[in-house]
Image (tube, helix red, strand yellow):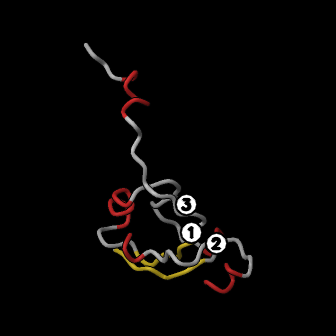
């Protein structure tokens, strides 16, 4: 399946129905582990962006991975959310 996808075939025509989303964006290592299982994050191919890679196995089956960008996790500064705190 990698070759047709990397040659432009629509991934939706090759994907099998699943309870998982077709795509994920801006999710943390913790969220990836909760969704795909412990250890899945550490196996993500992080060296090649914009190219379908895999398959990676987990309890749900095998997955092809397409990373568009990798963003470092960031903590929102307290000052930015202090006004949203309920002080009652």
The residue under the point 58% across, 63% down is 69
Looking at the image, which is closer to me, 36 or 83?
Answer: 83
Name the residue tied to disc 3.
23
Q: Is residue 70 above or below residue 85?
A: below
Along the line of sight, the residue nearer the viewer: 58 or 66: 66
Q: Earlier in the sequence, mark 1 or mark 3?
A: 3
Q: Residues within 10 Å of mark 1 (few under 14, many from 20)?
A: some
Which is closer to the viewer, label 2 or label 3? 2
Q: Position of residue 75 (x, y in %)?
A: 39, 45
Q: Which mark is residue 83?
A: none
Residue 24 locus on image (x, y percent): 52, 58
Q: Quadrant of residue 88?
A: top left
Relative vertical location of residue 70 with respect to residue 80 in this rendering, above or below: below
Marks 1/2 in contact by CB < 8 Å: the verdict is yes
Mark closer to the observer (1, 3): 1
Q: Earlier in the sequence, mark 1 or mark 2?
A: 2
Tell me the tag on residue 67.
1
Disc 2 designates what residue? 50
Q: CA distance from mark 1 to mark 2?
A: 6 Å
Q: Residues within 10 Å of mark 2 (few under 14, many from 20)?
A: few
Q: Secondary structure at mark 2?
A: loop
Residue 20 placement (x, y as % from top left): 46, 61
Q: Is residue 87 left or right of residue 58?
A: left
């Amino acid at each position: 399946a990698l070759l047709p996808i990397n040659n432009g075939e629509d991934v939706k025509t090759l994907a099998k129905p699943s309870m998982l989303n077709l795509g994920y964006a801006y999710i943390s290592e913790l969220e990836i582990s909760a969704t795909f299982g412990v250890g899945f994050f550490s196996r993500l191919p992080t060296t090649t962006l914009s190219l379908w890679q895999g398959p990676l196995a987990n309890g749900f089956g095998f997955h092809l991975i397409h990373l568009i960008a990798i963003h470092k996790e960031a903590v929102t500064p307290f000052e930015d959310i202090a006004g949203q705190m309920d002080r009652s």
